[in-house]
Amino acid sequence: MPDLDLWRELGQQLRVDAVRTSAHVGSGHPTSSMSAADLAAVLLADHFRYDFDDPKSPANDRLVFSKGHASPLVYGLFRAAGALSEDELLTYREFGSRLEGHPTPVLPWVDVATGSLGQGLPIGVGMAIAGKRLDRLPFRVWVICGDSEMAEGSMWEAIEHAAFYGLDNLTAIIDVNRLGQRGETMHGWDLASYSDRVRAFGWHAIEIDGHDVAQIDAAYKEAESTPKPTAVIAKTLKGKGYSKVEDQNGWHGKAIAEEAIQELGGVRNITVDVPKPEPSERHRFEPEPQAWPRYDVGSEVSTRKAYGEALAALGGERTDVVALDGEVSNSTFSELFRDAHPERFFEMYIAEQQMVAAAVGMQVLGWKPFASTFAAFMSRAYDFVRMAAVSRATIKLCGSHAGVSIGEDGPSQMGLEDLAAFRAVSGSKVLYPCDGNQTTKLVRAMGDLDGISYLRTTRSDTSVVYEPDEEFPVGGSKTLRSSDDDEVTVVAAGITVHEALKAADALAGEGTAVRVLDCYSVKPIDAETLRRLGTPIVTVEDHWAEGGLGEAVLAALADAEERPQVTVLAVREMPRSGKPAQLLAAAGIDADAIAAAVRALVSAAAPA
Amino acid sequence: MPDLDLWRELGQQLRVDAVRTSAHVGSGHPTSSMSAADLAAVLLADHFRYDFDDPKSPANDRLVFSKGHASPLVYGLFRAAGALSEDELLTYREFGSRLEGHPTPVLPWVDVATGSLGQGLPIGVGMAIAGKRLDRLPFRVWVICGDSEMAEGSMWEAIEHAAFYGLDNLTAIIDVNRLGQRGETMHGWDLASYSDRVRAFGWHAIEIDGHDVAQIDAAYKEAESTPKPTAVIAKTLKGKGYSKVEDQNGWHGKAIAEEAIQELGGVRNITVDVPKPEPSERHRFEPEPQAWPRYDVGSEVSTRKAYGEALAALGGERTDVVALDGEVSNSTFSELFRDAHPERFFEMYIAEQQMVAAAVGMQVLGWKPFASTFAAFMSRAYDFVRMAAVSRATIKLCGSHAGVSIGEDGPSQMGLEDLAAFRAVSGSKVLYPCDGNQTTKLVRAMGDLDGISYLRTTRSDTSVVYEPDEEFPVGGSKTLRSSDDDEVTVVAAGITVHEALKAADALAGEGTAVRVLDCYSVKPIDAETLRRLGTPIVTVEDHWAEGGLGEAVLAALADAEERPQVTVLAVREMPRSGKPAQLLAAAGIDADAIAAAVRALVSAAAPA
């Protein structure tokens, strides 16, 4: 027998707590919390199965607030569940508090950071795919969405993929409070505009009054028993319950007066005994050991192909490794993983945002996702990578077809900003191998890295320069040529290592000894080795001059006692189509350009 | 009387030319061109109105190949229109050729670069909005889309906005050839999956056989007379016309044998006399001059508010300026432009990709779009910015709420990677003002800048330090404190300028003279001044340490004869919520941290 009054009272408690927390600090989004309070109350009281003492339990339902600005509601829910004290609730948004302005996993019951709209649902899709296809557990993923964020294309990527993957374990609760930040949304209270769209994408949709607890309960029951992903589309009032702001524009993201508490009936202290899920064991895949690839020195293989081969081997050894790709698996070579471990491969089609979001969702459940596409198209998901760092997520990304060396396809397909973009991600690791054996070791290392790691691979075949048993620690570098007479050091990575070696050979013929340093770990970079070089430096990269290898080297030397002169060779003009060698030459990053830069440094250093 | 045979022959010619060009160079996407050949042939022969001798004419229809990999078809069309010679056609993908692997505006009949899928339709939306609301001309925007790219969320942002803006001048032609790069698409030949979706979004949809020229012609006629945006959803065969590859997987992006030419009936030399549009004058807005804002030194104003005020003034002076915003115009203050010039303001809701794409589309017609959102959310549109550079587009972007100084909202809302991301855009200008008067001048300067310019603004009020008549050339800097005894130079920008001034005052009290340099132009940076400083340097920025101001300074000094020691102060750990001053302190970028860094450099330089 449902306790409608309890649900209503709990909704009011959540509103009061949203008002209290925001008023206390003088900021936050109480009105956006109040619209969704009844939706959250019924969920917590009667549908959500979760062990607050064991938030990482694989049996738990997952709850994602895609509308992360409703953080006062999130924290009010945790108080109502008995997980958060009254005292801590009132630390909201204070420096050092776990209760940040938008939810982050600093709190153990928050799986992922939200606050960049349009991300929670795609991440929920990743969790739900994990539930159905990896963990194979009956948990349900609930995502509370705002109506404004339905304008984000990423929401429709999520809706498309949820239908495609048959995610009947996913419920999207859309809080249609009509008002965005600066005014009415595109569709206002036209609930049918949402339900028509999601139904056309293959979902079940239920339109309800989002303040009628009986309707909410019935909708959740229907969602639980419908063999499709379901959207509960709820008409609500922003600021519901406080007459001065209810359904009024101009109250987004503003604290409201504590007098609202009186109108809402005062502070309540209901604690809900949230039912725990049935204990259950997640599915485990069987190891399928296969030999690690080994390439003969002097043979040719592209690092992208070596990525695929290494990933397949890693997947045989580690059954927690999964792979995703953005419909280019025959270019990134993640298809080799797919062929070896089809149950752990997920085709994300041309939806890079959904691809990265799904990886973030899967890692919440403990999986180790590797996601790949062209390096250029990783830029499509940059906001998702940024937010993955705020989520303290552990994901592994591979961008292929880096730089002008791809050749004829032209600049739209050339990843030329990926080093800059990924270096500027908190805690990231940025790796850029030059040969097959190095790629193998770095992919293997990525399996153990925490946080966001990025591997940059090259389209064309390159010579194998390292023995298969060589080690490549993250943060290290390799000196490929050196002598006591080195006049200049060429710092290269990836494709330019081979150009640097050619240049060193040519210069040796002229009597100029050159050291060649392979900085395969662009972040963290091997600052110690760089600071010990004692020679002028030429850096060379198949990347824009900004934010890449050259600037990483400069940053490592910035405050050193000895700061050698550095010539940065990089791509500085928009490339065109052409053969790889033509484009490396045109960009001034081939062996000839390196040799010329070395000669200029040597003659500048020579006594007059 | 339609000439069905001519259309069929022209379709075959386009196929033959796609085969020829790709075979000649040994790469390219002939099969993706062959599927859309009949769709393109009927368009060129009987619907497209365009003056190939005057490609910039505002009366012209616009044609965007959203599936840019079908470049052999694009170039074949230009040959069929008499615009491109047989000889030039066969330079496809050669180094130096205008016929790049994916279309770019190096060719005068290409408005925008495509090749990153899912971008052509959103850009077409921008063109169509310009046609209806700015130019007020009857031209039509035709966008040829691939079926694979319908998985990109940006396509659904475009479909949503086209319906919202009532773009009956926009036709999307969806080439449903069933096969993506690595296999079948999500929906194969299920045309209804596309038509149901677009209809739910408010479009008209027509399903046809994409190889039946009469059906194609009828569909285009229907699109032209339907008062809604219309999608022509065409079932086609990839590689149509060459039995060895037709509807076969494994032929994406591969040149095919010239024997296909024989099966296709050999080389043809049809030239179509493409009808020119009626000459027509674009609408012009009336200037509405208003006073430029002037702020008193010592008063307080946020640079984001100064942006809005300056933009409104610029719009009064220049009637080609338009503004777009991602549903945060009351935060970015673009609402001040909206209020002053409502006909030239476009609400893009929370769809940053569509926002940037619309700006790119509008600038094709000669408008000067300024688009704004939080700096953090510019990352959502990074691939669109990257491609805008390949398009040689002139757009102006403003990211507000930069850095940890936003305070309580927390890291999801903090732009901390925007300097790195925008510096790594080809030809970009990156500007970061510290006060209201500087903002005004930089916004005014942006109106005249070519290429991609980015302005970074701060949430909180800051003191006005410059007189209203001070000039701030792009590429310059300002020395705010200096004396002959300066021991260290602090290089700051934006919010940290104020911290640097406070630090300089404190240090002066200790007898340490410090120069303060305001590098408001982060790119291009004032290398000349930096190379002349002759003191150790502290750089300080409210941005990650990678790719921002510090590394820009280091890059400017890299190959200088004197390379002073540089201490880079920047955000290095994930910020939390808190008050702005607490967060600046916690990140080590406030006045105290600057003073400490200066002291350390001074004592290191002192004789032992």
Image: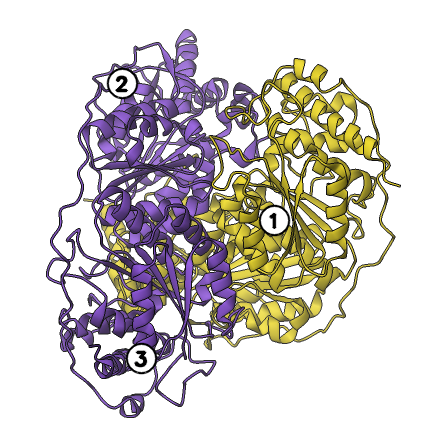
Chain colours: A yellow, B purple
Residue at 31% x, 77% y is B214
Tell me if B429 is positioned left or right of A475 in this view: left
Query: The disc numbered 1 marks a residue on which chain?
Result: A
Q: Amino acid at mark 3?
A: Gly
Query: The disc numbered 2 marks a residue on which chain?
Result: B
The label shown at residue B376 is none
At mark 2, the secondary structure is loop
CB-based contact (under 8 Å), mark 1 and mark 2: no
Between residues A527 and A133, which one lies in front from this camera angle? A133
Residue at 14% x, 65% y is B275
Q: Which residue is mark 2?
A: B293
* Alpha-carbon span between mark 3 and mark 1: 43 Å
Same-chain check, marks 3 and 1: no
Mark 3: few/some/many CA within 10 Å (<14, 14-19, 20+): some
Q: Which residue is mark 1?
A: A121
Q: Amino acid at mark 1?
A: Leu
- Which circle, 2 or 3, is nearer the viewer? 2
- Which circle, 3 or 1, is nearer the viewer? 1
Q: Is residue B474 visible?
A: no
Between residues A604 and A398, which one lies in front from this camera angle? A398
Quadrant location of the N terminus of chain A? Answer: top right
CB-based contact (under 8 Å), mark 2 and mark 3: no
Q: Which residue is mark 3?
A: B26
* Residue farthest toward the top in the current orientation of the protein: B509
Q: Amino acid at mark 2?
A: Pro
